[in-house]
Image (tube, rainbow, N blue to C red):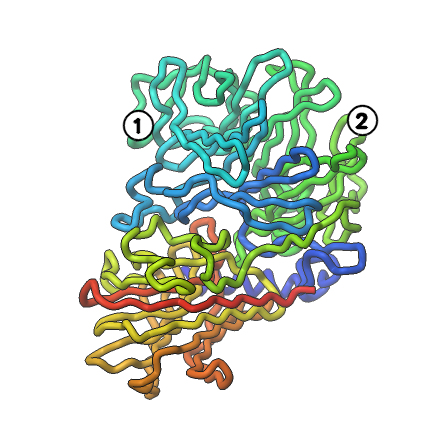
């Protein structure tokens, strides 16, 4: 059984488990604000993995990892923790982190920007993060929207922290003036977190140095620091203070009822270097029941009366690692999260809850775009850093112009440059429609609508031009290649300049494509395909454009309409 088929089987099993016996307690077609004073988890049913969220005054700001996508490290904003909007990205050009993330390399699948942290200190925003291959970075900004200034962190002697083997960095500025940063070492030796002293500007370790034996192109060995918790697989680090205690949050793999989920644990101590007490703070009920909530942040409301835990679900799924909000309260200076349904002192997932007593001033996540703005909508990210001269919003105002060029590998969808996409949101019925002006196409060109995961599987519906004739083509790809191609008998009339492609996806992640010449009469085309997950990425919906023969031709994208039905 190949990769995609195995994934599809798991997805269907998870989906049907969620629809039988646990429908009222699990992930249902209804999520987010329900309009009756309650919300249903997830609050964002898309791929918002590795979240970290802070409150600054009455505003909430969060980040989500983005791996090979550009711009990188998404920044989101909320007033009530239920409704969210995308307000920016920390890294405008991911190729500055590594040339492998550029369009002429495209080796960033399972690489790129991993989990990080967002903090507000001394009237500045800080985002610390790592890439799997290229070490530690810090970005600073006066405003969470940016612009952000990104630099590589250094050791105590000024050597760059560049190399493989670290993730989940989080800084902490103590009241006594000392600053610290924690990160997990998942590479050559122990897989556990270490805390280092840090310069007040957040850019340098003060008690850690790069080992002379380090090979920075492979593994980064840092000597020094303090191991806070020598438990293998501990990561997702966060540090905070409450009522005189230092708290260290981790996510780690533990045995639970015959399976091994990632679960959140907490250390606390009156001294930052311990000794520590440990407590599990959220119990997973099983992959098929709660999708493994684990990594996230503890937050209070502006009045300090209510507390919440915002988390992703760690089980890989075609909609990614989606975002949920759980109620929390303090019990004996330990956080009690969710609902302790089995009365063992550890909380479990809650799927329906009263909304926080906060106002939402019309905030909603962005999806549709008519490309009338001088900049791309915040929901868009390119699959790797785009080739700058091959796209434009100004050459034809009101349109996104995409110029075609050859893929890095012939017939490999995942080496097609300048593919632009956004997160898929799991709904009972979601519909995405792209309107393309195809008058500028050239022979050898292929352009249209697609869905794709993190580097393994995709499906697409587009128009191919061959010998001056345009035809509709459906492709389904597994293991990166187009393994199923359907070319129909329909020839696009020579005088037709506009074509519409539509994708419909149901709650189980089954999707089908349609096309139209008038945006009224749509014709189904191709086969049903299953949305998938790969390389820590859920499904993206996107627009692709390339030419197998030459650098020739372009399409103008008039609009992308994406409608969700989840209330």
**Vertical relation: 20 (above or below) 25:** below
For marks 1 and 2, the one nearer the N-term is 1
Q: Quadrant of the C terminus?
A: bottom right
Q: Quadrant of the N terminus?
A: bottom left
Return the x and y of residue 94 as percentages of the image width and height.
37, 42
Which residue is found at the position 66% from the left and 59% from the top?
A: 27
Which residue is found at the position 52% from the left and 41% from the top?
A: 145
Which numbered disc covers residue 332? 2
| Number of dots carrying numbers | 2
**Vertical relation: 20 (above or below) 129:** below
Return the x and y of residue 82 as percentages of the image width and height.
69, 50
Sort mark 1 into few (<14), some (14-19) or many (20+) by Cα contacts within 10 Å. some
Picture quadrant of residue 352: bottom right
Picture quadrant of residue 490: bottom left
Sort mark 2 into few (<14), some (14-19) or many (20+) by Cα contacts within 10 Å. few
Residue identifier under label 1: 216
Which numbered disc covers residue 309? none
């Amino acid at each position: 059984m190949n990769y995609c088929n195995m994934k599809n089987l798991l997805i269907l099993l998870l989906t049907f488990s969620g629809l039988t016996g646990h429908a009222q307690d699990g992930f249902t077609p209804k999520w987010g604000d329900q309009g009756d004073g309650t919300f249903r988890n997830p609050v964002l049913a898309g791929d918002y993995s590795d979240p970290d969220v802070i409150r600054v005054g009455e505003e909430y700001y969060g980040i989500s990892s983005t791996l090979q996508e550009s711009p990188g490290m998404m920044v989101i904003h909320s007033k009530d923790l239920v409704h969210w909007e995308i307000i920016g990205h920390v890294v405008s050009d991911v190729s500055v982190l590594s040339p492998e993330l550029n369009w002429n390399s495209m080796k960033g699948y399972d690489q790129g920007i991993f989990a990080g942290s967002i903090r507000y200190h001394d009237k500045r925003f800080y985002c610390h993060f790592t890439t799997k291959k290229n070490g530690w970075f810090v970005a600073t900004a006066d405003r969470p929207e940016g612009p952000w200034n990104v630099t590589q962190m250094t050791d105590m002697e000024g050597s760059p922290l560049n190399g493989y083997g670290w993730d989940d960095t989080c800084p902490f500025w103590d009241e006594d003036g000392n600053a610290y940063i924690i990160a997990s070492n998942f590479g050559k030796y122990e897989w556990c977190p270490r805390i280092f002293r840090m310069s007040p500007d957040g850019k340098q370790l003060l008690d850690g140095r790069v080992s002379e034996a380090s090979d920075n192109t492979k593994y980064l060995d840092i000597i020094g620091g303090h191991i806070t918790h020598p438990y293998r697989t501990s990561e997702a680090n966060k540090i905070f203070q409450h009522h005189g205690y230092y708290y260290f949050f981790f996510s780690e793999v533990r045995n639970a009822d015959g399976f091994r989920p990632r679960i959140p644990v907490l250390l606390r101590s009156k001294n930052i270097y311990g000794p520590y007490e440990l407590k599990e703070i959220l119990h997973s009920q099983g992959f098929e029941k709660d999708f493994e909530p684990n990594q996230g942040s503890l937050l209070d409301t502006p009045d300090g009366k209510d507390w919440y835990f915002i988390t992703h679900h760690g089980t890989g799924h075609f909609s990614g690692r989606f975002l949920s909000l759980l109620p929390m309260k303090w019990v004996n200076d330990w956080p009690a999260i969710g609902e302790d349904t089995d009365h063992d002192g550890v909380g479990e997932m809650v799927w329906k809850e009263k909304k926080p007593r906060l106002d939402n001033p019309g905030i909603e996540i962005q999806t549709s775009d008519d490309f009338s703005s001088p900049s791309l909508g915040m929901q868009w990210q390119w699959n790797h850093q785009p080739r700058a001269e091959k796209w434009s919003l100004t050459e034809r105002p009101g349109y996104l112009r995409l110029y075609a060029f050859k893929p890095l590998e012939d017939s490999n969808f995942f080496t097609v440059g300048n593919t632009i996409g956004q997160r898929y949101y799991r709904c009972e019925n979601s519909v995405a429609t792209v309107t393309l002006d195809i008058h500028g196409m050239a022979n050898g060109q292929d352009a249209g609508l697609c869905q794709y995961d993190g580097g393994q599987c995709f499906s697409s519906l587009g128009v191919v031009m061959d010998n001056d004739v345009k035809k509709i083509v459906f492709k389904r790809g597994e293991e990166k290649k187009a393994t199923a191609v359907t070319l129909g008998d329909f020839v696009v009339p020579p005088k037709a300049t506009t074509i519409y492609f539509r994708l419909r996806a149901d709650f189980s992640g089954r999707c089908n494509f349609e096309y139209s010449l008038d945006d009224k009469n749509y014709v189904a085309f191709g086969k049903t395909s299953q949305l998938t997950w790969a390389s820590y990425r859920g499904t993206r919906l996107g627009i692709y454009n390339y030419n197998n023969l030459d650098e020739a031709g372009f399409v103008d994208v008039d609009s992308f309409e994406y409608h969700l039905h989840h209330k």
